Amino acid sequence: MSYLKISEEVQNALDSGKPIVALESTIISHGFPYPNNVELANEVEETIRSLGVVPATIAILDGQIHVGLSKDEIELLGKAPDAYKTSIHDIPRVLSSKKIGATTVAATMYAAQLAGIRFFATGGLGGVHHGVNESFDISADLPTLAKTKVCIVSAGVKSILDIPKTVEYLETLGVPIYGYETDRYPSFYTRDAGLPVEKIDKTSLVQLLRTQDELDLNHAVSVVVPIPEEDELDPDLIEGTINDALKEANENGITGKKVTPFLLAKISEQTKGDSVKANISLMLNNAKTAALIAKEYHQ
Ligand code: PSU
Ligand code: MN
């Protein structure tokens, strides 16, 4: 496929059946400020490599979907003020106009599947927004999870979103959710969203994924991992901060793809960077978890 450009490192891993973990790039362009974003992207890749697994950061550059970025390409993306937040429906437009595209969970999943990558690590999934009854705002991540066969490791859905509705909607779409060594659904900055989740360990998860491979079932498997305990934010404080950010977004008429980046920037401002620290910690933890699962799957 001429629109797919797989790096040499990723291609070698694909050819030799080595484990690979895909990574999104919206977290680089819209999730963190420069240079934290580039530092984190590199650190995430190093964490995965140190476990003998190949990282594949995905983005759109020069009219091609790049699977596996060089350090220079990560830097370019981290510095590009006009990188286009590319969800699944934006892919043809970003490719044909040769814009720099940072891929969301939805677009990254699509690219990972196209390249033949089974695992994906990210911070948080998109989902159903608060006030959905009025706004109808539901991330394209959700329907894409229903039709894309990747195992995606995240710290759940953060409470900038309506977590119970997101979980309910994933069930409707036929996307299974498993708590990695936990029976509480995590809420990104904190370890417990107040919802139960089915607990799974690595061995059972790998068995389940291999079973899925034998079937004609092309949904994602969502694996949720709580943020490490020492980096968890105070649940009451973060709840208040999120509520303020939501109010401000509403008052400023922020809609569409701008909602998530707006809320993240506000929260970072309000917590004086504590939310950024927490985000880094959980992202590294998710990358490590995804790499360990991928390694066992490819044994
Ligand atoms: N959640 C985060 N940080 C992020 C995102 C979600 O904690 O950066 C990004 C992801 O790339 C996700 C996207 O796929 O936002 C969802 O955006 P939207 O709701 O516009 O689909
Ligand atoms: Mn949206």
Image (tube, rainbow, N blue to C red):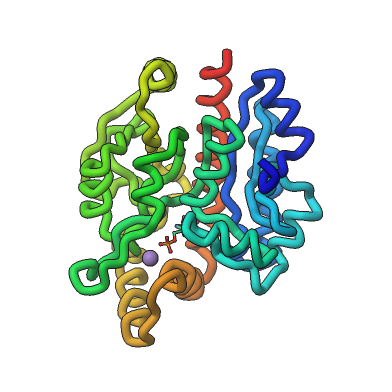
Vertical order, 222 against 268 (above or below) = above
Q: Nearer the viewer, residue 155 or 80?
A: 80
Q: Quadrant of residue 291?
A: top right
- Viewport quadrant of the N terminus: top right
**Location of residue 229 in the rendering, given as x and y in whole percent from the top left corner:** 42, 43
Q: Nearer the viewer, residue 14 or 236?
A: 14
Vertical order, 267 against 51 (above or below) = below
Report the residue at 44% width, 51% height from top. 124
**Location of residue 14 in the rendering, given as x and y in whole percent from the top left corner:** 67, 26
- 261 lies left or right of 100: left
Residue 27 visible in the current orientation: no
Report the residue at 48% width, 50% height from top. 105
- 9 lies left or right of 144: right
**Location of residue 144 in the rendering, given as x and y in whole percent from the top left corner:** 40, 47
Residue extending furthest toward the top: 299
- 161 lies left or right of 294: left
**Location of residue 56 in the rendering, given as x and y in whole percent from the top left corner:** 65, 40
In this rendering, the count of numbered labels is: 0
Residue 79 visible in the current orientation: yes
Q: Nearer the viewer, residue 121 or 90?
A: 90
- Viewport quadrant of the C terminus: top right
Residue extending furthest toward the left: 133
- 109 lies left or right of 163: right
Report the residue at 66% width, 50% height from top. 65
